[in-house]
Amino acid sequence: MAQLIDGKAISKQIKDELKEQVAELSAKGVKICLAVIQVGNDPASSVYVGNKKKACAYIGIDSLSYELPEETTEEELLELIDKLNKDDAVNGILVQLPVPKHIDEDKIIKAISPLKDVDGFHPMSVGALSIGQPGFVSCTPAGVIQLLKRSGIEIAGKECVVIGRSNIVGKPMAMLLLRENGTVTICHSKTKDLKEVCKRADILVVAIGRPKMIDASYIKEGATVIDVGIHRDENNKLCGDVDFESASKVAGAITPVPGGVGPMTIAMLMHNCVDSINIK
Ligand code: NDP
């Protein structure tokens, strides 16, 4: 049976470390403040926003909450972002995605100052990551690196296969593994012989958005399997992109869903908020 990579415990460890750092900063008179903007009242978004505010409170980060009505115009949202960009008391700005369809998501992402882009989605942040310069890193893939490092799994020199090439998970994931000196392959829906490519992986990161697609037949004996996916199965139980039951019999180490990558995303958002004082 594979070693279980415990995202719940590791995220708690990170949040506790951040809590100490924030207390030390606070003693020196340095405050950290995250502005969270939600447009509309999508129930899933409300849960995510609530969890982010709870994490801020736990760590000692101030949070400013902007709950805007569904009919907020793009211009109004841009005005608010501009105001927060100019506010020296605000270190990080987060617009909960997705925004309603009448608002251009790319425009919103670009409007947030790269110095306050705690989600790491701004093209400047993405560019900085790809040329190895300091900047905010997308939280979910940054969380995966922490899971690997804190579980004692070496990345340097390893065959790393990432399934998925989205801007928020797959692509930054590949860049981060490369930064850690992994040998990286990115797979997507047009990849030929997906199974064969995956079977080369010492570290397989799965971010496809397809429930339980990756079973043992895609996994090399002893490989580390990181499941980014989150879904509800036919019994309304949470599951990932990996068929845990079958994969855990072949993998050397594996993340569960829930309790794997999920809790790491918020922990790394909190890390980015604290790190914002170093991003110049
Ligand atoms: P996207 O839908 O944006 O991307 C999915 C990627 O998977 C695409 O690159 C797509 O290829 C590829 N893909 C789809 N089908 C196949 C296939 N049959 N074979 C090979 N590749 C395929 O998803 P995200 O990256 O946003 O998210 C991925 C998963 O992670 C989702 O389940 C999501 O819910 C979850 N997630 C979890 C988070 C967390 O905090 N734990 C945070 C963010 C996401 P192509 O580009 O060719 O279309």
Image (cartoon, rainbow, N blue to C red):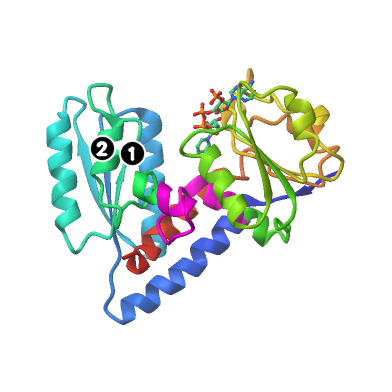
x%, y% of residue 49? 36, 42
Of label 1 and label 2, which has the lower sequence position? 1
Which residue is under mark 2?
Answer: 108
Figure quadrant of residue 237:
top right
Q: Is residue 102 above or below residue 92?
A: above
Where on the image, by quarter, is ligand 1? top right
x%, y% of residue 151? 70, 58
Q: What amino acid is at disc 1?
A: Gln
The furthest residue to the top: 234
Q: Nearer the viewer, residue 131 or 94?
A: 131
Secondary structure category for the residue under label 1: loop
Q: Is residue 116 left or right of residue 155?
A: left
- Residue 142 lies in magenta, yes or no? yes
Which residue is under mark 1?
Answer: 96
Q: For the residue carrying disc 2, how many other residues have a C-alpha within 10 Å: few (<14), some (14-19), or many (20+)? A: some
Quadrant that contains the N terminus:
top right
x%, y% of residue 135? 40, 58
Q: Which residues are magenta?
A: 126-146
Q: What amino acid is at disc 2?
A: Ile
Residue drawn at x 42%, y 47% is: 126
Q: Is residue 190 above or below residue 150?
A: above
Q: Is residue 12 left or right of residue 198?
A: left
Residue drawn at x 38%, y 64% is: 274
